[in-house]
């Protein structure tokens, strides 16, 4: 029977239209401690075929190094105490479904595992790891190619780790509702993806780091590449799920949307680069948080939302280092904190007059370089200038700055230096005006010079000047008195 006919038959069987018995899916069990997959006597009823299910549950290891290995379905670690291992050093294995750890819980650090050092591994429908609650499994991809034509699910109901140090992992798909790469699918599920070395991961549809369960993705190899179309970080809205992505090195190449939020979504970038091959939007919403500490970001758009109907909570983008290069930035109800690094955008819009919550743009201290082509602050928007001991960073605007909403000047530690500080320097005349300006105290004032520079000034209060004068006079008197005595 041709492989593609079998796959269609399996799909119909899932829908209840064809019985699995009619497909000839009687399993063949691995029966030795270790040996080659291609040896018929290593299996209970002979080597698996295109219409047979292969099962490895006896704690043994099947080695694959030959071309043309095939089975309808591969199950490893079927029951709680079962274990199974596959070691692929070359050749080709093809199947429709694979369950790497079904109920299998393993013992200590030992769990059901697939190790692929080389060769080609093709899964026509779905690769499912740690299917049931408390189950555990691992896939180690060190070389070769793994292709999942529809799904890779890591930690379905149990706990699973996918460790890629080399080779290529491809997850293709045609249906947005059913085809995806996912970590932590069910509430009891937990999935971890570690991408290091020279690993190359490609996901052509949706990718979820966290869903109803917990997902974690760590990319930490300088030569790693992660290509994604729609990458969702965080649990499903309304669930207890969570998701976190740590980008430490390598390239994350996006081609549509990087969505951080939902339930407990966090993206932390301490290195590496985010690029887009097609115009990409980065959204931070719900309880999502994006921390840019180092590395670079070069994408089309950043949107930060707050209390949208589909994602309650306030998204937060925080930059303390690295570089952010964008075409447009829309702050629509969340918080954007700029405390360091370079933030460069052609257009920055803070707030909207009608939709979403009240967004805050907060400039903290004087360590950030903020360059925008145009600046528009609307009625619901707020600008915070939060001083530290060194002062405040200016927003440098290439053309027009249009003001509205609120402006807050804050000195939370009481250590702001005295002097005049530029807040916005525009290339064209500033238009509009704030609805209200909130200063820390009477020793602060503000103004606009030459229609292009918004500034704030901090001067000592008269009482402070009097104390300084008295202190200075007393000091001079002591010096003079000291000279007379000598």
Image (spheres, rainbow, N blue to C red):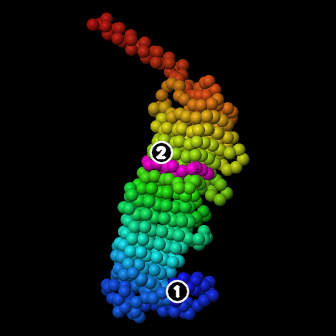
Distance Cα–Cα, label 2 vs label 1? 53 Å
* Mark number, residue 19: none
x 36%, y 73%: residue: 118
Camera sees residue 64: no
x 55%, y 41%: residue: 362
The spot of residue 125 in percent (x, y) is 53, 77
Q: Secondary structure at mark 1?
A: loop
Q: Secondary structure at mark 2?
A: strand
x 61%, y 28%: residue: 452
Q: State the residue position of label 2.
A: 323
Pointer 1 local density, CA inside 10 Å: few below 14, some 14–19, many at least 20:
few
Pointer 2 local density, CA inside 10 Å: few below 14, some 14–19, many at least 20:
many
Q: Is residue 298 magenta?
A: yes
The image quadrant of residue 15 is bottom right
Camera sees residue 290: yes
The magenta-colored residue range is 287-305
The image quadrant of residue 84 is bottom left
């Amino acid at each position: 029977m041709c492989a593609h006919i079998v796959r269609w038959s399996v799909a119909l069987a899932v829908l209840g239209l064809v019985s699995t018995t009619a497909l000839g899916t009687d399993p063949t069990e691995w029966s030795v401690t270790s040996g080659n997959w291609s040896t018929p006597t290593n299996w209970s009823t002979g080597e698996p075929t295109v219409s047979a299910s292969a099962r490895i549950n006896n704690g043994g290891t099947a080695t694959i190094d030959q071309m043309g290995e095939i089975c309808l379905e591969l199950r490893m670690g079927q029951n709680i105490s079962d274990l199974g291992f596959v070691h692929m050093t070359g050749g080709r294995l093809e199947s429709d479904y694979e369950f790497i750890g079904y109920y299998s819980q393993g013992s200590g650090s030992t769990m059901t595992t697939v190790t692929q050092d080389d060769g080609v591994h093709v899964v026509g429908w779905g690769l499912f790891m740690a299917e049931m609650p408390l189950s555990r499994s691992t896939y180690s991809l060190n070389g070769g190619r793994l292709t999942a034509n529809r799904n890779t699910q890591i930690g379905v109901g149990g706990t699973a780790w996918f460790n890629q140090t080399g080779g290529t992992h491809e997850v293709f798909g045609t249906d947005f509702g059913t085809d995806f790469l996912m970590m932590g699918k069910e509430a009891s599920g937990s999935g971890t993806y570690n991408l290091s070395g020279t690993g190359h991961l490609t996901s052509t549809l949706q990718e979820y780091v966290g869903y109803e369960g917990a997902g974690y993705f760590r990319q930490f190899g300088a030569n790693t590449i992660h290509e994604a179309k729609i990458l969702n970080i965080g649990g499903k809205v309304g669930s207890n799920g969570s998701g976190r992505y740590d980008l430490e090195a390598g390239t994350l190449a996006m081609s549509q949307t990087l969505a951080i939020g939902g339930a407990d979504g966090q993206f932390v970038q301490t290195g590496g680069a985010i690029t887009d091959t097609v115009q990409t939007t980065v959204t931070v919403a719900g309880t999502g948080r994006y921390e840019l500490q180092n590395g670079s970001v070069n994408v089309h758009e950043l949107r930060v939302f707050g209390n949208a109907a589909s994602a309650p909570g306030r998204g937060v983008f925080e930059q303390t280092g690295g570089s952010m290069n964008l075409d447009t930035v829309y702050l629509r109800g969340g918080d954007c904190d700029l405390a360091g690094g370079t933030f460069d955008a052609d257009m920055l819009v803070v707030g909207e007059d009608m939709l979403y919550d009240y967004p805050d743009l907060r400039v903290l201290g004087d360590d950030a370089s903020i360059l925008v082509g145009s600046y528009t602050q609307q009625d619901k928007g707020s600008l915070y200038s939060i001083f530290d001991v060194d002062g405040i960073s200016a927003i440098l605007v290439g053309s027009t700055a249009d003001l509205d909403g609120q402006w807050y000047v804050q000195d939370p530690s009481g250590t702001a230096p005295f002097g005049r500080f530029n807040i916005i320097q525009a290339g064209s005349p500033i238009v509009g005006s704030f609805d209200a300006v909130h200063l820390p105290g009477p020793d602060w004032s503000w103004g606009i010079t030459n229609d292009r520079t918004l500034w704030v000034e901090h001067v000592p209060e008269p009482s402070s000047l009097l104390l300084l004068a008295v202190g200075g006079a007393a000091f001079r008197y002591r010096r003079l008195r000291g000279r007379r005595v000598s």
